[in-house]
Amino acid sequence: MNRVKVSEPGTSRYEKIALDIAYSIWKEEYKVGDIIKGRSTLSGKYGVSSETIRRAVKLLEEAEAVSVEERVGILVTSK
């Protein structure tokens, strides 16, 4: 289910996607230690480019909510 509303003014798509994923982590749809689907899968889910997903994931990395593990995926590291 895509909860991001791309028509909301003032926030970029990648920020909205990062907030949506963070909300999913907060609601424990994703738990610490879970692997979130890859960038291409998330791109399809949100209807955006993989670059937009990369930027969203980068925000989550900076917030220490996830880490990107090579050949593994996007790992939830914190709630």
Image (tube, rainbow, N blue to C red):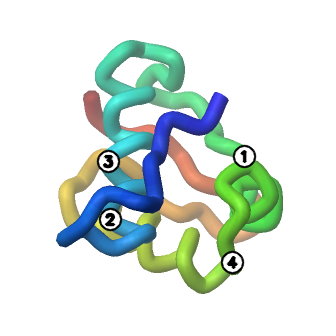
Q: Which residue is mark 1?
A: 37
Quadrant occupied by the C terminus: top left
Q: Are marks 4 and 2 in contact (CB under 8 Å)?
A: no
> Callout 1, which amino acid?
Lys
**What amino acid is at disc 2?**
Glu
Q: Check whether the beta carbons of the residues at disc 1 and disc 4 lie within 8 A of each other.
A: no
Can residue 78 be seen? yes
Marks 1, 3: nearer the viewer:
3
* Residue contact between numbered discs 2 and 3, judged by CB atoms under 8 Å: yes
Q: Residue furthest bottom?
A: 51
Q: Which residue bears the numbered disc 4? A: 50
Amino acid type of disc 4?
A: Ser
Q: Earlier in the sequence, mark 1 or mark 4?
A: 1
Discs 1/4, front = 4
Residue found at x 40% / y 50%:
66
The crowd level at tag 3 (other Cα within 10 Å; few <14, some 14-19, many 20+) is some
Amino acid at circle 3: Leu
Residue 24: % across, % down: 43, 27
Mark seen at residue 15: 2
CA distance separating discs 1 and 3: 16 Å
Helix, strand or loop status at disc 3: helix
The Cα atoms of the two marked residues, 2 and 3, are separated by 6 Å
Q: Which numbered tag is attached to residue 71?
A: none
The spot of residue 29 in percent (x, y) is 51, 17
